[in-house]
Image: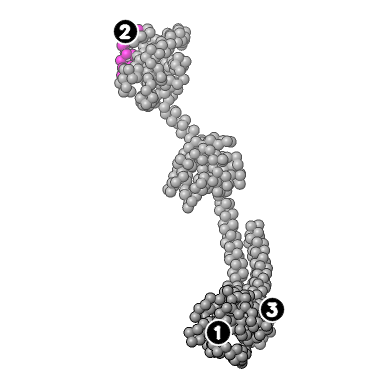
């Protein structure tokens, strides 16, 4: 016990007391309560003394009126004065006896008052009960009527001051002021100590937080275990350790993200970019730090539109293939989306080459390999689509079926290789004769079909005649040096005048073509 006392100085004990919760939470309210109780006690004592004094004077006035009533009735004034100056009334300031007209007829202390009219006589009302007449400053005056044998003889006035009570109250008031001053000084001292301590703690905490912000997570402090401040810094240290682990993990995961051969963009619910790896620079020509924190709309409007229409609000993974148009690059992207809490992780692959390859394959599948015109299957797909479009937009179009009249002779006389060359020439004439938006197809052998969009029957007839004229004007030399003249027959069917069904349209045009061939008409005017 002795060794413990020798280690802790009184100043240190006081400082620890200042730091303790009890002092800060309970001591000041208790001191305030004690001061308030003391003040209330002072006021209570003052009021109690005043009440007791007034009741005593009231009773004393009644006693005096009874004692001197008989002497006043017999007008024995010397006896009255003797009573007034008796030892029983020694402590009183003065006692006056006043007749009904207000003149002083007897007094404890004469002082030349006998025979004079009492100044405040007009304030006295005749009554048979005790009456407090007036109070001026510390002077109190009590009056009691003198009635003897049924006759009203005057008043007894007892004059007294409350200076003694005022002194008591003044004492307690001074005591109250002293208590307030003491309390104020205590509050100032405690506030100064606490503010200095708080300032020190805030400065130290600010230093540590700035240190953490700069990436230094080593927190060292020297406070006793169990102290509130020590607990604060212990929490800061734990937070620093947690942040250190988080930063390490973040750097680790960022390294993994940057190693992936995919663009990764993390987007929150509001459409802001929260994270991105280095691979996005290949697509956006921007470093990750340049897009993190920005709205996706500012980074790439196409991606923003895809996010708003196809990604936002989804809770399950989704894969999207779309053409992305950015400021620096247009490409086809395969976007795999996963939602993690309140963020969306977008894995973006550039599949432009794959898409172009697929388009090329589809185009090859839809084209005739010899003439590079659409093939039969593609013709029917376009025709059905054209019917739907015309029905929706309430427009018209025409179908043209063409068949070569003398192509079989070319094949029979000069062989299929030369025949293929002729077919290519025919395809060139077809492309030259019709518009770029028209669908030209090789239906099979030497038969061709054309879908004339937004064209009525009359205009279709003009375009068909132009082809026939171009075909007849085409000069082709055979292997034997002869010049070959090609002829063709055609038939036209218009939507919706003649038919609304794709198959029926083709059958009508095909029948008209054979009718033309059988009639050997040069220019069909059907």
Front tag of 3 and 2 = 3
**Region rendered in magenta:** 507-521
In this view, the residue farthest toward the front is 74
Q: Are marks 1 and 3 in contact (CB under 8 Å)?
A: no
Comes first in the chain, label 1 or label 3: 3
Give the colouring mode of the picture.
one colour
The answer to whether mark 1 and mark 2 are in CB contact below 8 A is no
Pick whichever, 409 or 153, lies toward us.
Answer: 153
Task: Give the residue pinned by disc 1.
Answer: 61
Marks 3 and 2: CB-CB under 8 Å? no
Q: In this view, does 155 lie above or below 209?
A: below
For the N terminus, the quadrant is bottom right
Q: How much space separates mark 1 and mark 3, taking CA atoms?
A: 64 Å
Badge 3 density bin: few <14, some 14–19, many ≥20, Cα 10 Å: few
Q: Residue at x 69, y 78 (%)?
A: 11
Q: In this view, does 294 lie above or below 190?
A: above
Main secondary structure along the magenta-highlighted residues: helix
Q: Determine which quarter of the picture holds residue 60.
A: bottom right
Residue 36 image offset from top left, x and y in percent: 58, 75
Q: Which of marks 3 and 2 is nearer the N terminus?
A: 3
* Secondary element at tag 3: helix
Q: What element carries label 2?
A: helix
Residue annotated with mark 2: 519
- Taking the magenta stretch, the answer to whether it contains residue 172 is no
Query: Residue at label 3?
Result: 11
Tell me if I can see residue 176 in this picture. Answer: no
């Amino acid at each position: 016990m002795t060794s413990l006392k020798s280690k802790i100085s009184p100043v240190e004990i006081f400082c620890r007391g200042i730091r303790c919760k009890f002092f800060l939470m309970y001591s000041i309210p208790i001191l305030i309560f004690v001061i308030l109780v003391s003040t209330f006690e002072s006021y209570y004592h003052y009021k109690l003394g005043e009440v007791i004094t007034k009741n005593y004077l009231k009773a004393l006035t009644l006693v005096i009126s009874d004692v001197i009533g008989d002497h006043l009735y017999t007008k024995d004034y010397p006896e009255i004065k003797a009573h007034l100056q008796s030892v029983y009334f020694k402590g009183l300031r003065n006692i006056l006896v006043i007749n009904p007209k207000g003149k002083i007829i007897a007094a404890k202390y004469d002082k030349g008052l006998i025979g004079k009219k009492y100044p405040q006589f007009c304030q006295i009302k005749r009554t048979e009960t005790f009456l407090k007449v007036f109070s001026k400053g510390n002077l109190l005056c009590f009056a009691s009527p003198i009635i003897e044998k049924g006759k009203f003889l005057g008043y007894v006035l007892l004059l007294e001051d409350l200076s003694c009570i005022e002194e008591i109250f003044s004492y307690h008031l001074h005591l109250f002021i002293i208590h307030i001053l003491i309390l104020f000084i205590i509050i100032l001292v405690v506030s100064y100590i606490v503010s200095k301590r708080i300032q020190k703690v805030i400065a130290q905490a600010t230093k540590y937080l700035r240190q953490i912000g700069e990436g230094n997570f080593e927190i060292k402090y020297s406070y006793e275990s169990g102290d509130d401040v020590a607990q604060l810094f212990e929490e800061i240290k734990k937070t620093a350790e947690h942040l250190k682990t988080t930063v390490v993990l973040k750097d680790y995961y960022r390294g993994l993200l940057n190693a992936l051969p995919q663009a990764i963009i993390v987007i929150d619910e509001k459409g802001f970019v929260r994270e991105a790896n280095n691979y996005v620079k290949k697509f956006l020509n921007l470093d990750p730090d340049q897009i993190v924190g920005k709205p996706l709309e500012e980074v790439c409007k196409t991606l923003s539109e895809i996010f708003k229409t196809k990604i936002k609000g989804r809770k399950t993974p989704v894969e999207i293939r779309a053409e992305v148009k950015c400021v620096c690059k247009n490409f086809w992207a395969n976007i795999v989306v996963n939602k993690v809490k309140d963020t969306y992780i977008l894995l973006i692959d550039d599949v432009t080459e794959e898409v172009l390859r697929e388009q090329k394959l589809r185009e090859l599948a839809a084209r005739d390999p010899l003439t590079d015109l659409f093939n039969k299957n593609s013709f029917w797909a376009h025709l059905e689509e054209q019917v739907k479009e015309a029905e929706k937009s309430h427009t018209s179009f025409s179908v043209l079926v063409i068949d070569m009249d003398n192509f079989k002779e070319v094949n029979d006389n000069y062989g299929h290789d030369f025949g293929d060359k002729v077919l290519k020439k025919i395809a060139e004439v077809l492309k030259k004769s019709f518009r770029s938006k028209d669908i030209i197809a090789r239906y099979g052998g030497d038969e061709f079909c054309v879908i004339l969009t937004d064209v009525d029957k009359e205009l279709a007839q003009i375009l068909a005649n132009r082809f026939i004229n171009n075909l007849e004007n085409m000069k082709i030399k055979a292997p034997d040096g002869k010049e070959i003249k090609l002829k063709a027959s055609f038939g036209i069917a218009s939507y919706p005048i003649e038919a609304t069904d794709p198959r029926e349209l083709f059958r009508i045009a095909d029948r008209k073509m054979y009718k033309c061939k059988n009639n050997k008409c040069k220019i069909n005017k059907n």
